[in-house]
Image (tube, helix red, strand yellow):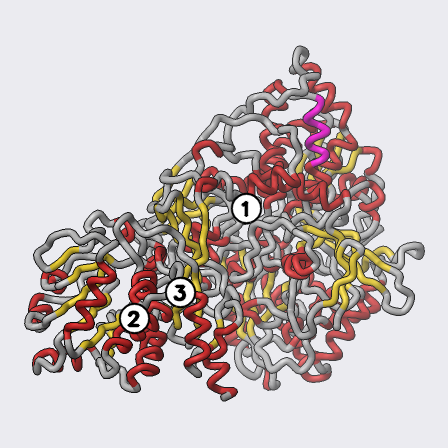
């Protein structure tokens, strides 16, 4: 294997991997600061923050010959016997120079800047900058420019060009450009053609400083108040890995979580701004009976179990927004009471066609996170996955008397006409986020959980299972589907998604690889099918 | 020393820019012979033997540049003629293209033949409208006469030449900036590697040469490598990296001289000789104070250094980076070096492309300081800061992608090291109360 020497430490590079200096140093535990380089974008090599000394070691004599010039690590592909020095006086001086240069015309308005606290300019200046300001002081300016989906704070920009390259290489929309030369260079759009594409929010994440502001997040929270939790986007069946950032059970921001096997470094705006429904005041927060009177949660489980037992032929509608564990527990519950109960998948929302971007990112037409997972669970219990329409047909023939419907849809999902077909049921349990024509007819209307409140696993369109913990607590009065079914099944303790998944993995071939603690990038369920 | 002009042999003739006059003077004879008798490898070998070095500023051996092209490449290979002559004090390419465009074209055709390039772009700066007309007319004449187009002069070799007019940016003269500009993008020089010979214009192997270099190729093919090597300075024996400086060179002489103009002399003529022999001495009977050596970005030499030979190696002995473009600008004794450096900083701050941090901010900062110094609010400390900027920006220390920052740095470095007394005297005279101040002070204006 090729050996690289980084700051006097030898590092073996995995054979066949093309790494640049920054990536190799990271493997060795050495941080090389950089602004313009990003693993998902082409190499610009212009910020000059990643300058290092490079040399070669003669494999026979062990003598090291260094190049006289500093070299950007981002554009240096490491090779056998290459020597990188990142901690020399020369490198430190170059970094201090770049930091000093970048702050020459920077407004240093950190107290009113959204990026403060997660700003590379701050971090690197603290780490590598020099304490004294030697440049002439200029009047404070902080010009703003509306670029479309995002706001540009012109004077905070360090001209790394990441946003411009993103718009050219990943979204393929090329709205952004640089105008002006030298110190007058600025990020701009052509008048009448604003930054307006479904991936535009990513440029805010890419911006290493506070130049690009997310209009949705601007001035709403200081980032150091936010706690972030691993999540999976439920916007479509791509199932992007995300960070859910919350403060005291309020979601403020969704950011992409790096996952080379799913979404790389990106998410779409649909997923990024898909959290307001979580805090929608119209959400159901109180279990009610058919008369519309509130029911107390403490009495409800027993009452539900009794009603289900007395109803006769049962059926269940499993929403594609449920996690695998929740679907499993619900199937187990319904089938435990009525072993022949038909199990149907809820309506699968489809909008348009898959949208594929030049950088490879795809937004799927299937706007739910877990159709595959829920269908696999149903198939295990019922052999046949009934569609929602098939269930409706059975209702019309009065073939079932009691139905449990899990909703969880973010938008209106059922109309009056369809809901009316549930009219003649003896028992209708509806667990959902929002009131709907169906909820009006429910014998028991139970408030359901939104995705940051759920715990469990999703299976995306490529059979990748990703498990998440809950990011926020559900609002008072709401119990997640998982915890409710857990209790209805008479299980001990609190809802434990991991235990449920272990059970599922033991019982079902499709999920059998999910026994290990789930890696952050998820598990490929197909791997097992191929092997089996 | 008498030198019979070769590169400028035609310029005095009436209608020198036309094909008829050029052919009457022996033009395109070399091309006919080369296409018949020489293989492309022969031409490369000939140019290698001649020791021709690029006339654009860096002085890179032309034959070696050609040998970097990948062998047996399926093509296309592109050729770019760098006619974006925007170095302050430089105007020799303009003379060549206006008065002898066919000489440039013949050199281009020969070089394309040698490199197997099938398309050549002449990247011409916007400010040269007459060059554009004359070059286009020359291309049209060549197409009609069979010197350009398919199967040139009955051979297998085909070549198209296009003129691409830039929009007037200094950085377009940097070869990868030029390539980006031809591709229709902003002229931000590319990070190297890959070098243009491997991946250049439209991601294909590309050769970029200065106008004057190509004119030399024509004469090397006409007269042989021996003739070319009979002029100039042989390699310095103590410096293994010096391939020597051979051949004739055009010098653009301007500034405070009696007869400014474009002159041809063998490499190795000294600054003083050039001023006296061709320029007729410093104007108004004054003495010289300094001279820009070869375009602004090579910095200045003081009068005491006027015996410096103008070749590729000697300027390094007086603290300058090299010959540059051969644009000599003479400054007389009344001219303030503060004004000189201010003007230089203004130019480079204006022309920095804005890509690399050290250049974008360094040139801007230097200009801010020079503005303040000029306005009588300078501090002695500023000179150290200026020097530090000069020493830390550019491809020499490795802090930028292209050489523009080096160009900005050399005038600062040379002016401050050779005329520091004058700067100190100016600052102390104009800012008697504040010249020792060390705290940052308010800048004058935004640039």
Q: Is residue B84 magenta?
A: no
Q: Which residue position holds label 1?
A: B354
Q: Which residue position holds label 3?
A: A456
Q: Chain of mark 1?
A: B
Residue at x 57%, y 45% (from the top left corner): B352
Q: Quadrant of residue A399?
A: bottom left
Secondary structure, mark 1, is: loop
Q: Position of residue A323 (x, y in %)?
A: 35, 67
Whole-number angstrom distance, CA of label 2 to CA of label 1: 61 Å
Give neighbour class at mark 3: few <14, some 14-19, many 20+ (Cα, 10 Å). Answer: many
Most extreme residue toward the top is: B433
Marks 1, 3: nearer the viewer: 3
Residue A330, labelled with which disc? 2
A187 is higher (above) or lower (below) than A417: above
Whole-number angstrom distance, CA of label 1 to CA of label 3: 49 Å
Considering the whole magenta stretch, tell me its main secondary structure. Answer: helix
Secondary structure, mark 2, is: helix
Part of the protein shown in magenta: B380-388
Q: Chain of mark 2?
A: A
Q: B69 or B129, which is in the foreground?
A: B69
């Amino acid at each position: 294997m090729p050996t690289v020497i980084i700051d006097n430490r030898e590092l073996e590079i995995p054979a066949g991997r093309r790494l640049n200096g920054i990536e190799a140093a990271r493997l060795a535990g050495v941080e090389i600061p950089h602004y313009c380089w990003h693993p998902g974008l082409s190499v610009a090599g212009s910020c000059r923050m990643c300058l290092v000394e490079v040399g070669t070691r003669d494999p026979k004599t062990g003598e090291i010959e260094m190049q006289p010039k500093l070299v950007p690590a981002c554009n240096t592909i490491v090779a056998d016997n290459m020597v990188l020095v990142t901690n020399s006086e020369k490198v430190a001086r170059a970094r201090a120079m770049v930091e000093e240069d970048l702050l020459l015309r920077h407004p240093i308005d950190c107290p009113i800047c959204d990026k403060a606290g997660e700003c590379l300019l701050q971090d690197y200046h603290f780490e590598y900058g020099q304490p004294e300001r030697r440049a002439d002081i200029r009047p404070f300016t902080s010009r703003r420019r509306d670029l479309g989906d995002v706001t540009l704070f012109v004077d905070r920009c360090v001209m790394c060009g990441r946003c411009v390259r993103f718009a050219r290489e990943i979204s393929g929309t090329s709205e952004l450009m640089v105008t002006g030369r030298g110190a007058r260079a600025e990020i701009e759009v052509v008048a009448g053609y604003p930054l307006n594409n479904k991936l535009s929010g990513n440029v805010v994440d890419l911006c290493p400083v506070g130049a690009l502001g997310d209009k949705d997040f601007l001035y709403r929270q200081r980032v150091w108040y936010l706690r972030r939790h691993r999540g999976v986007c439920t916007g479509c069946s791509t199932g992007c890995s995300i960070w859910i950032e919350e403060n005291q059970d309020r979601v403020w921001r969704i950011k992409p979580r790096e996952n080379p096997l799913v979404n790389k470094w990106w998410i779409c705006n649909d997923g990024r701004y898909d959290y307001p429904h979580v805090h929608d005041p119209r959400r159901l927060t109180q279990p009610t009976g058919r008369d519309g009177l509130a029911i107390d949660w403490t009495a409800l489980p027993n009452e539900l179990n009794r009603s289900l037992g007395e109803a006769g032929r049962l059926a269940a509608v499993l929403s594609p927004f449920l996690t695998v564990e929740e679907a499993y527990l619900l199937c187990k519950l319904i089938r435990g009471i009525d072993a022949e109960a038909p199990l149907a998948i809820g309506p699968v929302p489809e909008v348009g066609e898959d949208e594929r971007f030049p950088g490879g990112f795809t937004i799927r037409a299937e706007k739910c996170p877990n159709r595959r997972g829920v269908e696999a669970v149903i198939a295990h219990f019922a052999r046949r996955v009934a569609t929602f329409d098939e269930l409706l047909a059975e209702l019309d023939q009065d073939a079932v008397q009691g139905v449990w419907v899990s909703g969880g849809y973010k938008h209106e999902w059922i109309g009056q006409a369809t809901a009316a077909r549930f009219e003649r049921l003896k028992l209708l349990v509806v667990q959902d986020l929002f009131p709907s024509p169906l909820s009006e007819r429910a014998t028991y209307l139970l408030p359901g959980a939104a995705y940051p409140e759920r715990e469990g696993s999703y299976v995306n369109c490529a059979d990748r299972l990703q498990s998440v913990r809950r990011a926020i607590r559900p609002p008072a009065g709401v119990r997640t589907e998982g915890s409710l079914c857990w209790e209805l099944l008479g299980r001990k303790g609190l809802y434990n998604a991991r235990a449920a998944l272990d059970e599922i993995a033991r019982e079902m071939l499709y999920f059998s690889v999910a026994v290990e603690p789930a890696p952050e990038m998820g598990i490929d369920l197909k791997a097992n099918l191929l092997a089996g | 020393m008498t030198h019979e002009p070769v590169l400028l042999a035609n310029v005095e003739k009436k209608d020198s820019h036309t094909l008829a006059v050029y052919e009457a003077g022996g033009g395109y004879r070399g091309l006919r012979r080369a296409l018949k008798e020489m293989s492309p490898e022969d031409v490369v070998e000939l140019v290698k033997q001649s020791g021709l070095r690029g006339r654009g500023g860096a002085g890179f051996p032309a034959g070696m540049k050609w040998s970097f092209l990948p062998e047996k490449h399926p093509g296309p290979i592109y050729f770019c003629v760098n006619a974006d002559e925007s170095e302050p004090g430089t105007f020799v390419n303009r003379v060549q293209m206006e008065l002898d465009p066919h000489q440039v074209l013949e050199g281009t055709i020969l070089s394309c033949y040698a490199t197997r390039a099938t398309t050549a772009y002449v990247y011409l700066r916007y400010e040269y409208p007459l060059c554009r007309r004359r070059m286009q007319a020359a291309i049209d004449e060549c197409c009609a006469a069979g010197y350009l187009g398919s199967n040139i002069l009955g051979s297998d070799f085909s070549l198209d030449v296009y003129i691409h007019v830039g929009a007037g940016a200094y950085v377009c003269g940097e070869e990868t900036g030029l390539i980006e500009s031809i591709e229709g993008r902003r002229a931000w020089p590319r990070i190297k590697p890959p070098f243009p010979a491997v991946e250049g214009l439209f991601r294909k192997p590309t050769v970029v040469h200065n106008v004057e270099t190509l004119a030399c190729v024509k004469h090397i093919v006409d007269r042989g490598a021996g003739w070319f090597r009979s002029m100039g300075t042989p390699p310095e024996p103590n410096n293994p990296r010096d391939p020597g400086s051979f051949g004739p060179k055009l010098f653009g002489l301007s500034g405070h001289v009696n007869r400014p103009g474009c002159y041809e002399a063998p490499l190795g003529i000294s600054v003083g000789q050039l001023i006296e022999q061709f320029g007729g001495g410093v104007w108004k009977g004054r003495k010289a104070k300094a001279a820009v050596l070869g375009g602004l970005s090579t910095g200045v030499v003081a009068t005491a250094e006027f015996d410096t030979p103008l070749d590729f190696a000697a300027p390094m002995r007086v603290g300058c980076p090299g010959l540059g473009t051969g644009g000599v600008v003479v400054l007389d004794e009344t001219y303030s070096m503060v004004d000189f450096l201010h003007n230089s900083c203004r130019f480079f701050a204006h022309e920095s492309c804005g890509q690399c941090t050290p250049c974008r901010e360094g040139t801007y900062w230097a200009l801010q300081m020079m503005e303040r110094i000029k306005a009588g609010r300078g501090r002695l400390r500023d000179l150290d800061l200026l020097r530090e900027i000069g020493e830390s920006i550019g491809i020499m220390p490795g802090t930028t992608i292209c050489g523009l920052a080096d160009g900005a740095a050399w005038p600062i470095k040379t002016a401050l090291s050779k005329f520091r007394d004058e700067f100190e005297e100016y600052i102390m005279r104009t800012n008697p109360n504040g010249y020792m101040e060390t705290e940052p002070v308010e800048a004058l204006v935004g640039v």
